[in-house]
Amino acid sequence: MPATTLALELDSVVCTYPDGYEALHGVSLTVADGEILALLGPSGSGKSSLLRAVAGLEAVTSGRVLIHGKDMAGVPPHKRGCGMVFQDGQLFPYRSVGRNVAYGLEWRGHSKEYIAREVARWLDLVGLHGFENRAVTTLSGGQAQRAALARSLAAHPELLLLDEPFSALDRDLRERLSVELRSILKAANAAAVYVTHDHHEARTVADRIALMDDGRITD
Ligand code: ADP
Ligand code: MG
């Protein structure tokens, strides 16, 4: 057994879109177990492309993506063990908050009692105690992003991928949620890649920062 296991390892990953545009020019990076890495770079630098390549939503042209040591070549997105949270958390609008959080657990066929306990636990952790029966449409932007985070974490992802999850929120809320996000991820002992174009946010959330520019890691 290696001394530290890696949650994620990218080895010279190239991603070329169908129109021939090369968005990633050979990216290598690692994320240790329980580590939060911020991917910081300007708009258009390839941050979302990198996350999508890790999640299996974009094809990798060459190079390797390993999650907990396992080569992801040919592994479909739903079997990669990645949780994703986007700018708009994309909650299911016709499910209550509780049933959104329950989604990944229902899928695995857990008992009702277990699911109810887990949903309550994750809602507590993200500061939405008692929100089980609320309609998603009644949530504020910040609450919706917390609910999306709870939904991802409840499924116990091996790796959490967050793509500018707070960028649609106003500045004060963004700052508060960044601080909270760090403690939530640490409490869950989740390995995560946090994409942002905001230096301050990157420093607040992450253990380590990788700078990205024009499809390359530059630091
Ligand atoms: P970021 O998330 O850092 O803003 P992206 O990964 O979204 O950057 O985009 C990186 C580059 O790849 C941009 O130049 C963008 O226009 C291009 N790109 C993104 N998606 C596609 C696509 N589906 N087809 C072609 N080019 C794309
Ligand atoms: Mg992006």
Image: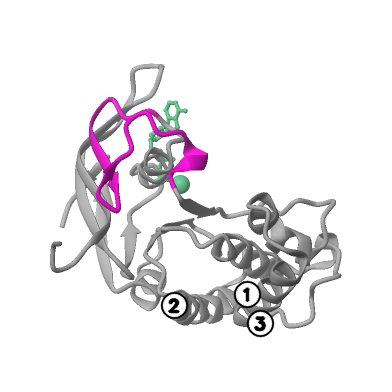
Residue type for callout 3: Asp
Pointer 1 with pointer 3, Cβ within 8 A: yes
Q: Is residue 168 above or below residue 181?
A: above
Q: Which mark is residue 3?
A: none
Question: Residue at left 39%, top 78%?
Answer: 204
- Whether residue 65 appears in magenta in the rendering, the answer is yes
Question: Residue at left 70%, top 76%?
Answer: 117
Q: Examine the image and state in which quarter residue 111 appears.
A: bottom right
Question: Residue at left 33%, top 75%?
Answer: 203
Upstream in the sequence, badge 2 or badge 3? 3
Q: Which mark is residue 122?
A: 1
Q: Name the side, left or right, on which 111 lies relative to 187.
A: right
Instruction: Give the image location of residue 191, x and y in percent.
Output: 37, 65
From the image, tell me which residue sits under label 3. 124
Secondary structure under the numbered disc 2 in the rendered image = helix
Pointer 1 with pointer 2, Cβ within 8 A: no
Residue type for callout 1: Trp
Which segment is the magenta one? 59-80
Q: Examine the image and state in which quarter residue 167 appears.
A: bottom right
Q: Which mark is residue 182?
A: 2
- State how far apart marks 1 and 3 are (Cα): 5 Å
Instruction: Give the image location of residue 14, x and y in percent.
Output: 25, 32
Residue type for callout 2: Arg
Q: Is residue 152 above or below residue 125?
A: above
Ligand 2 within 8 angstroms of badge 2 C-beta: no
- Quadrant in the picture for the N terminus: bottom left
Please name whichever residue, 212 or 184, is drawn nearer the observer in this view of the structure: 184
Please name whichever residue, 216 or 35, is drawn nearer the observer in this view of the structure: 35
- State how far apart marks 1 and 2 are (Cα): 15 Å
Tag 1: Cα neighbours inside 10 Å, few (<14), some, or many (≥20)?
many
